[in-house]
């Protein structure tokens, strides 16, 4: 659509856009203000002639592709070899030159975007997070901040920053497992990127991890709600400050599971949260001591034994 707001002849604002003719017409004086306009929208009419392909518009552009999906390739090798020998040699030369003329940035993006899609798929991240991570990586690459760092660590750091931006809980340990890069290296690269680009990310909250951890551990909704209540009380006594959000969330779930007689071992909870059993044990002790939950847990265990 055009940005025209009023008729240049009579200053009327009653304009009519005809998508079939590609024209903008003034309803008051009849002046054709603009014509032969190109409709850039998607054809949803569903009317196709026999033999027409439905994908007339091509694939949508995506920032997750190094060329945003706009590049036309010379052809696949299998298709080229079906031609006559002379034409085959010609198209093989064209294909080779097409790969040669690409810049170093394009070559880097081609590899990086493939790595990004693989890592994000392993972590089961939504498309909006992948787009945001690809956008961050483009900024990093354009500013020359990738130099001296492994591509895998930068991709993992960009994905972690995108997750933090959209409040999607993913730990550095999960990023390290998905990308096969050390946790410390990802954290170091992440801090470097957000400092250089001035990205404002939200602080992780232990509450963000409760839903995912309880789903994996197959805990009941009541246990999940009790864990949120434990976290709320822990925040009131300032027990969550200065501690890892995944660790305190896992400990709250472990406490809630004991209160509801849903026995889960510390090893199971620690593995899901990506932390050690020692961390679970320390956070568990802090919660039951500061929140006076020991008597309540013992009471629940006694009731469970009585029922049996």
Image: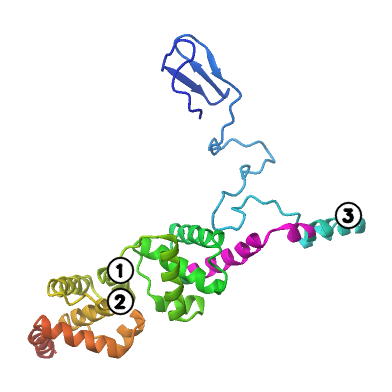
Left or right? Give the position of 184 relative to 38: left
Magenta-span inclusion, residue 96: no
Quick one: label 1, few (<14), some, or many (20+) residues within 10 Å?
A: some
Point out the tag, 3 or 1, that comes first from the N-terminus.
Answer: 3
Distance from the alpha carbon under mark 3 to that under mark 2: 60 Å
Please check the rendered image and state whether residue 107 is part of the magenta-colored stretch, yes or no. yes
Numbered circle sitting on residue 252: none
Closer mark to the observer between disc 3 and disc 1 = 1
Q: Is residue 285 above or below residue 123?
A: below
Please, what secondary structure does the residue beneath circle 3 have? helix
Find disc 2 in the rendering and name its residue.
246
Which segment did they paint magenta?
97-121
Give SS at disc 1: loop
What x and y, as percent, mark residue 104?
66, 62
Mark 1 or 2 closer to N-term? 1
Image color mode: rainbow
Q: Position of residue 108 (x, y in %)?
A: 62, 65
| Observer-nearest of 210 and 291 | 291
Report crowding for label 3: few under 14, some 14 to 19, many 20 or more residues within 10 A (C-alpha): few
Along the line of sight, the residue nearer the viewer: 18 or 280: 280
In front: mark 3 or mark 2? 2
Contact check, label 3 and label 2, Cβ < 8 Å: no
Q: From the viewer's perspective, tell me whether residue 12 is left or right of residue 76.
A: left
Marks 1 and 2, Cα distance to the nearest angstrom?
A: 9 Å
The answer to whether mark 1 and mark 2 are in CB contact below 8 A is: yes
Q: Which residue is mark 3?
A: 87
The disc at residue 204 is 1
Quarter of the view holding residue 219: bottom left
In the drawing, does residue 243 fall left or right of residue 99?
Answer: left
Task: First in sequence, mark 3 or 2: give its number.
Answer: 3
Q: Secondary structure at mark 2?
A: helix
In the rendered view, tell whether residue 186 sits above or below residue 258. above
């Amino acid at each position: 659509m055009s940005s025209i707001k009023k008729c240049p002849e009579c200053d009327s604002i009653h304009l009519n856009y005809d998508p079939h003719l590609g024209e903008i017409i003034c309803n008051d004086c009849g002046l054709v203000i603009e014509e032969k306009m190109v409709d850039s929208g998607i054809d949803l009419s569903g009317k196709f002639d026999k033999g027409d392909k439905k994908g007339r518009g091509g694939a949508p552009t995506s920032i997750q592709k190094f060329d945003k999906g706009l590049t036309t390739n010379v052809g696949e090798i299998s298709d080229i070899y079906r031609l006559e020998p002379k034409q085959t040699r010609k198209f093989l030369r064209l294909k080779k030159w097409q790969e040669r003329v690409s810049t170093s940035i394009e070559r880097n993006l081609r590899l990086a975007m493939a790595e990004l899609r693989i890592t994000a798929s392993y972590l089961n991240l939504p498309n909006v997070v992948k787009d945001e991570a690809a956008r961050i990586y483009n900024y990093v690459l354009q500013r020359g901040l990738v130099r001296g760092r492994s591509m895998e660590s930068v991709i993992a750091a960009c994905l972690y920053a995108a997750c933090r931006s959209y409040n999607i809980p993913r730990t550095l340990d999960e990023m390290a497992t998905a990308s096969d890069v050390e946790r410390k290296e990802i954290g170091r690269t992440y801090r470097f990127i957000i400092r250089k680009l001035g990205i404002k990310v939200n602080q992780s909250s232990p509450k963000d991890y409760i839903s995912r951890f309880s789903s994996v551990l197959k805990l009941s909704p009541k246990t999940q709600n009790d864990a949120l209540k434990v976290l709320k009380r822990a925040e009131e006594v300032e027990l969550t400050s200065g501690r890892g959000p995944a660790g305190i969330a896992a400990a709250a779930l472990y406490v809630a599971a004991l209160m509801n007689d849903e026995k889960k071992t510390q090893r199971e909870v620690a593995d899901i949260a990506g932390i050690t059993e020692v961390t679970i044990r320390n956070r568990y002790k802090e919660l039951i001591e500061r929140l006076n939950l020991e008597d309540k847990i013992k009471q629940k265990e006694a009731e469970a034994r009585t029922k049996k």
